[in-house]
Amino acid sequence: MKLWGGRFESGSSEAFERFSGSLRFDRKLVSADIEGSRAFARALARAGIVTEAECRQLLAAFDEIAREAESPDYFQGAEDEDIHTFVIRKLGEKAGAVSAKIHTGRSRNEQVSSDIRLYLRSAADTILQQIADFCEALLALARKYPDAVIPGYTHLRRAQAVLWPHYLLAYFEMFERDYERMQQARGRINVMPLGAGALAGSGFGFDRQAIARELNFAAITRNSMDASGDRDFALDFLYASSVILLHLSRLAEDWILYSSEEFRWMALGDGVTSGSSLMPQKKNPDSLELMRGKSGRVFGALTSLFVTMKGLPMTYNRDMQEDKEPLFEAFEQTSGSLAMAKVVAESVTLDRARPAEAAEESWVVATDLAEELARSGVPFHRAHQLVGQLVLESFKANKRPGDWTPETLAAFAPEFKPGMARLLHPAEGMRTRELPGGTGPAAVAAALEQAEQRLAAMRSGGTQA
């Protein structure tokens, strides 16, 4: 069955049918297509195009199709052009002649856009929930080790000591921004194109606002040409998904390193790791590696649709059929990765002693000493040089920061006072960093409380500054 054909003397070639058919992937839109068509049937009734009895007949048929579509083999043997023609064919089998009225005043262009928006709205809601779930797991992991000290890194070199919760709160910030980005994308998704027609608007007097209310759309499209050719909302979803995977990939890289034999800071649970088919000793971080790898697939989905759209003239072009597979792929990989990340976070155990030892044996305290000298009146450039010389001497003598005593520190240079030796221990230096956003213990405790409040705002469907 086709929704067009009167203009043609012959049918499509077999090669074109195979090349252009999309049912194999756009069947994922079946629920959205039925939902939008139900609302359109009611709009037809309000406009007097179908009777109330015919409307009930159509709605009953759609309900039956929806129930049958839950069967995994529902599409077995179907050769329809796409999900829309499939549903129309099924509607005709169940409702008879009245099914031919369902497309009165409706174009497939606006129908496709509506279906995708309904699908993506649900997808966005799922991802928003999963971001909140993962953020909750991060905060639980932070509270599990509230006083643990770890080195912070720049250039993958030990830089300054931070608290473990401060490190995890950095990722909380990233994922809260991801939540906001996906929320914003959802807002642009949640605009209804029905009534836009093919590009010029419908010739029938539909109440577009009533259809939008019925489908829980927040607004209607304002320009019929834009509605027909727009996939910005899909690109917004793909971009938001890509940044989520970017952040997950960075976290995965960290935790792959920190759980390695070279670091040995943390252990991942057996449930999120795997072994080797040859080497009996191996415990591989496959869950994190897969998460890192799947980011490329989501980035590819964004690039695919972005390049598809960049050269299209107004308004709808068949190229836009290529939007669906990237969207389905991105949602599947983003949702799956977030679910996996939550389970990984819940499995992590931190060996507090190892990162603390890494901080103690390295010169992550150097900046603390330089700033203390500056507070005592030494110009910072001179303070920087003095501490650099102290570090160099320590390397030559194979001395750790803790090997210096108040007396030997003061003997090294007169600018060093004996009391400054306390800052040779990382936990002391962190106490000077109590500005909001810093790693001082009080600042981190306050930040954790604020993060809990912001998580509660996510749970309620909003965000809190």
Image (tube, helix red, strand yellow):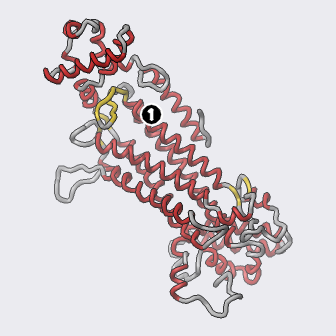
In the rendered view of the protein, which quadrant contains the C terminus? top right
Asked whether, in this view, residue 399 is left or right of residue 114, the answer is left
Q: Position of residue 437 (x, y in %)?
A: 47, 26
Residue in front for this viewpoint, 394 or 165: 394
| Residue depicted at 41% across the width and 30% down the height | 166
Give residue 68's position: percent from left, percent from top.
59, 73
Crowding at mark 1 (Cα within 10 Å: few <14, some 14-19, many 20+): many
23 or 274: nearer the viewer: 23
Relative image position of residue 118 (x, y in whole percent): 63, 60
- Above or below residue 376? Residue 187 is below
Seen from the viewer's position, the closer of residues 15 and 375 is 375
Viewed as shown, does residue 179 lie left or right of 152?
Answer: right
Residue at the spot x=54%, y=77% of the render?
Answer: 75
- Labels in figure, total: 1
The residue at 35%/43% (across/down) is: 347
Q: Residue at x 67, y 68 (%)?
A: 315
Instruction: Give the left or right position of residue 41, taking residue 118 as reference.
Output: right
Position of 138 compared to 155: left or right? right
Residue 314 appearing in the image: yes
Q: Name the image quarter holding residue 32.
A: bottom right
Asked if one can make out residue 34 in the rendered structure from this viewpoint, the answer is no
- SS for tag 1? helix
**Compared with residue 381, is residue 338 higher up or lower down, i.e. above or below?**
below
Tag 1 residue: 169
Residue 182 in the image, given as x and y percentages of width and height: 56, 48
Q: Quadrant location of the N terminus? A: bottom right
Amino acid marked by disc 1: Leu
Question: Which residue is farthest bottom?
Answer: 9
Which residue in the rendered view is the most extreme toward the left?
397
